[in-house]
Image: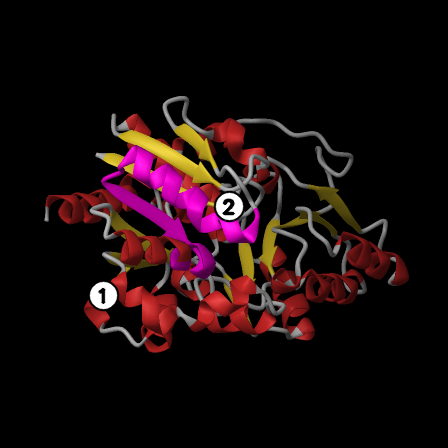
Amino acid sequence: MKLAFFYRQLNQGGIQRVIVNCANYFAEQGHDVSLILMKREGEYHELLHPAVKVIYFESLSKISLYRSLKTILTKEKFELLFSATPDLNTLTLLYKIFSRTKTKIVISEHNNTIVFFKHMKFSLSKLSFLSIPILYRYADAIVAVSKGLGDKLRKVALLPEHKITVIFNPAYSNLLEEQLSVSVKHEWLGPQAIPLIISAGRLTEAKNHQLLIEAMHLLSKKRTARLLIIGEGHLRQDLQQQIDRLGLSHVIQLPGFKLNPVSWMKEADLFVLSSDYEGFGVVLVEALAAGATVVSTDCDYGPAEILEDTYGYLVPVGDTAALAERMEFALDHPIPKGTLVARAKEFSTENIMRKYNQLFTDLIEK
């Protein structure tokens, strides 16, 4: 198959990791795989399989985005194009409608569409959400990365149930296994170290690290523990100021973005996700793979489907006291690592990509 995966850039983020895992898998299987990117920046470039061809947009001016995509697709004549997020999905579907291309278009949703729309600033991207009920019906297939997300998307896009395929994210890969073997160094790691809690994700509003810091403040009054929040984002300064204001600089650190977060997770006694909303939660699977007991907000969508009341602890969204209490409980009641790793492997690239391979093959052979 001649396939293309389309996204903005390969900076930190769960969607980017999924795009890389998908492209690498099909390249390893001997298919002709390209990755179309709007920008050249991003830390995940070095994770790409050598056989994956990377194609960049000619221009990033808003009036040229459609022309840039059209130029690439007209030249390459892919059998199938896979895109993610509403604004890029909209762009690919407009191309399908106006060009009458034979290229099969598969679009995917990775976020809580309604909440994400409400939190976005007014922009061209936000306007693209309004076109979902009109344009999404023209896709050859639509993938939602969790059952809850799929149910919500059906209502938002006014689509029949058969139009949406739920395929969990391929979060457990060979690359992840390699990263688990990498050792990391930090002043808080080592024999007889104080219990360590780790969180990982972009430092943005959706991840609500403010809640986690407040919960850590409550927990620190009861027991000794430390927290590393891995990731970068525009809220770094605000979060650091919150840490300093609460007098927690000896308890919480922001070590920045790490290309191999699972190498850090394997050193943790506990992993915590404090998000207000998710589409799936790739980072939770990574934490399970690292053998870390997990505490997560029961946000829409993903955590409850991944943890299933068995593989981690869930707390209400936005409840500081409940998060602090469950973190304390989890430190005293860790879940066996073997149980967690076995669950993570259910989201392996091999298992998940079989479903993508079947979907892509069926569409191309039609």
Query: Relative to 248, does residue 254 appear above or below in the rendering?
Result: above
- Seen in the image, is 268 located left or right of residue 345? right
Residue 254 visible? The answer is yes
Q: Main secondary structure of the magenta part?
A: helix
Q: Nearer the viewer, residue 304 or 59?
A: 59
Q: Which residues are magenta?
A: 61-90
State the image coordinates of residue 274 (x, y, percent, origin top left): 61, 63
Residue 78 in magenta stretch: yes
User: Reading the chain from its start, which is encountered first: label 2 or label 1?
Assistant: 2
Query: Relative to 189, does residue 108 appear above or below in the rendering?
Result: below
Q: Which residue is mark 2?
A: 8
State the image coordinates of residue 133 (x, y, percent, origin top left): 35, 73
Q: Nearer the viewer, residue 209 or 115?
A: 115
- Seen in the image, is 187 located left or right of residue 6? right
Identity of the residue furthest to the top in this view: 50
Query: Relative to 271, does residue 146 appear above or below in the rendering?
Result: below
- The residue drawn where x is 63% and y is 51% is 202
Residue 73 in magenta stretch: yes
State the image coordinates of residue 84 (x, y, percent, origin top left): 41, 53
The amino acid sitting under disc 2 is: Arg
- The residue drawn where x is 68% and y is 54% is 203
Q: Which residue is mark 1?
A: 163
- The residue drawn where x is 46% and y is 59% is 87
Q: Nearer the viewer, residue 49 or 240?
A: 49
Specify the quadrant of the image occupied by residue 326.
bottom right
